[in-house]
Image (cartoon, rainbow, N blue to C red):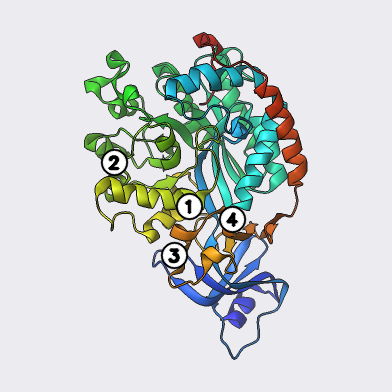
Amino acid sequence: MVASDSIRLGLTMYDLLIHNAWVVTVNARCDVIPDGMIGIHGDVITLIGPKDPDDALPAARETIDAGEGIVLPGLVNAHTHLPMTVFRGLADDLPLQAWLTDHIFPAEAVHITPHTVHWGTLLGCAEMLLAGITTCCDGYFLEDAVARAVAMTGIRAVLGHGVIDFPAPGVPDPAENIRTAATFVRQWKEQSPLITPSIFCHSPYTCSDKTLSRAKAAAVDEGVLFQIHVAETREEITADGDRTPNGSLTARLAQLGLLDADTLMVHGVWLDPTDIERVAQSACGIAHCPESNMKLAAGIAPVPAFLQAGIPVGIGTDGCASNNNQDLLQEMDMAAKLHKVAGGDPTAMPAPQVLAMATRDGARAIGLGDHTGTIERGKQADLVILDSTHPAMCPIYNPVSQAVYAGSGDVVRDTIVAGRVRVRNRTLVDNQIHDIMTHVRAIGRAIGKLKTHQPIADTEKGPCS
């Protein structure tokens, strides 16, 4: 196998070889390869298979011994707001509206600047890489500053510029919101092979129908993903009844032309069976954010019904102001157990299904399914190695169940994006985490001085919470 691959590709050696691993492919057959190895040429996987105990290892410029650890496809965080790491823990254990209007919105209005966005994004990317996340889907404002910071870290990202019908950082005139987002998309289409621009309409309750239609049309014109929060709260379903045909939010979105395979709906907590059928027929993806939904008591999304309907569902952490971390392994464990207890069925959301949501199906939902999300020849070399020497990884009977139910960011040893090692032995290779944290601590001290206990006018609200 090794020799034929080398001949076919004209290679004398691999750029990177990983061996001595449980290789969990998350391919269509859900293949798991004990004592497996993965060969990488450039940024692409070119070899997957078991090691023959009688053969020497193939030649490689760099070899990584996984130490009998678990190698997964790089995790895909299907929804986050990267700069909001600067608000981690700012206002916990509050009702949703008090949390937003009395704390988060005022803090965003004062403190979201290119400087805070830069350092908050760097911290968010560092946290994700250290937790085995190789791809994220972000939505916020000042997204050019987000993109420049993301490019420094080497993580793969879909980055959505925010659109909303009131003044926002970088877009003081709401009339310019769609033009600004489209300009961002055009600027970043060819700048980095790891960055895919997108347009992010905050929600149906913060954007007029005209804005929603025009933003989606701009996304279609540019050929990019359209992101939108949908049905996160019960109140969202009942609000604006005069704008919602037959009381159905998804019917309204369909009427506006928003529902198709290039739209990512975030949350979907309060979608009913008719909504689910409509979303499935449209081929929209959904990002499920269980911990954020739980913390804000938004509800439990009907994810088993989504999956039964064939909807591509990814898992997202949401922003650090409402979670409060970006640990997708932990999020997988929570998603699996939440839906078991909610439905009274211990067989619901089995580990392979949940792992697929955090990898293959998440990549599909955000439009990157042809590039990442599985360990297969020709796919991008986005990989994470879980450390078998960590107590939580001992012993290993089923590596898929081990990853989902025993895994956390703490067990991640190495993270590889596009063939480049970004985390080695739990340490960031290319970025100084202590420097990043020093800057974010200073930002936190400034935010902490702001009195955030008084409601503010609608026109002063922050962008993306």
Above-or-below relation of 455 to 266: above
Q: Nearer the viewer, residue 436 or 263?
A: 436
Report the residue marked by disc 3: 400
Label 4: element kind: helix
Residue kind at label 4, given as amino acid type: Asp
**Residue found 55% across the figure and 56% down from its top:** 74
Report the residue marked by disc 2: 281
Residue 324 point in image, percent of width and height: 53, 38
Mark 1 or mark 3, whichever is nearer to me: 3
Structural crowding at the residue carrying mark 3, measured as other residues with C-alpha within 10 Å and reported as few (<14), some (14–19) or many (≥20): many
Q: Earlier in the sequence, mark 2 or mark 4?
A: 2
Residue 46 point in image, percent of width and height: 59, 69
Mark 1 or mark 4, whichever is nearer to me: 4
Residue 318 point in image, percent of width and height: 50, 37
Label 1: element kind: loop
Task: Return the mark for residue 410.
Answer: 4
**Residue found 52% across the figure and 31% down from its top:** 199
Measured Cα–Cα span from mark 2 to mark 1: 19 Å
Q: Earlier in the sequence, mark 1 or mark 4?
A: 1
Structural crowding at the residue carrying mark 2, measured as other residues with C-alpha within 10 Å and reported as few (<14), some (14–19) or many (≥20): some
Are the residues flagged by discs 2 and 4 in contact, CB closer than 8 Å? no
